[in-house]
Amino acid sequence: MAFDRDDPADLAALKSEEADDPISMGYLHDGAEQFLLDQFNEPAQNVGGEISGVALTVKVFFDNMVPSEFGGNQVDAGELMWIDTILSFMPVDEDRNIEEWRAQIIDILPNGSDTETNLDALSRLISRAEVLFGDGTDISKQDWRTARDS
């Protein structure tokens, strides 16, 4: 799903987003076009704070963990057993989604660890345009002008 300037439904959705401002983005209705485009396209401007990323599966975890960070005294033995339990439910399935435990796993890791950095990099803030029309969407001046004038 991406914004299509030739699709009346997309034009109406974009125009309505600006006019109704459903999540209080603070769109200015005074013709400040570049300000408006920045609000649509810049993830930091999206007050909704939505993210996009890779779901945390057993395989993704193992692909992004740094084994040395789980040895010695870096992770408590009980916490290490808990992680092992989460990862090794029978039958072992590398595609099993363990997203619901992401926060707890990250809390167990040493602050600033490479594993934590790797897991954090799997997700990113997304723009309001991406929320409305899909990942990678960028609203151009022409897109906005066509929607505004539709």
Image: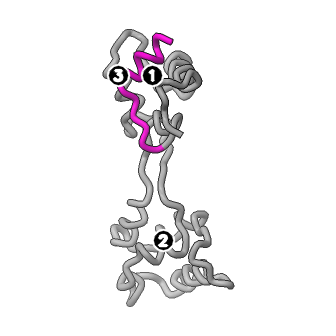
Q: Amino acid at mark 1?
A: Gly
**What numbered label is drawn on residue 141?**
3
**Which residue has dot 1 on it?**
26
Mark seen at residue 98: none
* Amino acid marked by disc 3: Lys
Magenta stretch bounds: 135-150
Residue in the foreground of this view, choosing between 122 and 15: 15
Q: Residue furthest left?
A: 34
Q: Earlier in the sequence, mark 3 or mark 2?
A: 2
Q: Which residue is mark 2?
A: 60
At mark 1, the secondary structure is loop
Residue 147 on the magenta span = yes
Sequence-wise, the earlier of marks 3 and 1 is: 1
| Residue 19 spot, x, y in % from top left | 52, 16
* Disc 2 from disc 1: Cα separation: 37 Å
Is residue 74 in sight in this rendering? yes
Amino acid, disc 2: Val
Disc 3, SS: helix
Image spot of residue 145 (x, y percent): 40, 16
Q: Is residue 24 magenta?
A: no
Viewer-side label of 3, 2: 3
Residue positioned 46% across, 34% down in the render: 129
At 43% from the left and 73% from the top, the residue drawn is 109
- Above or below: residue 61 compared with residue 75: above
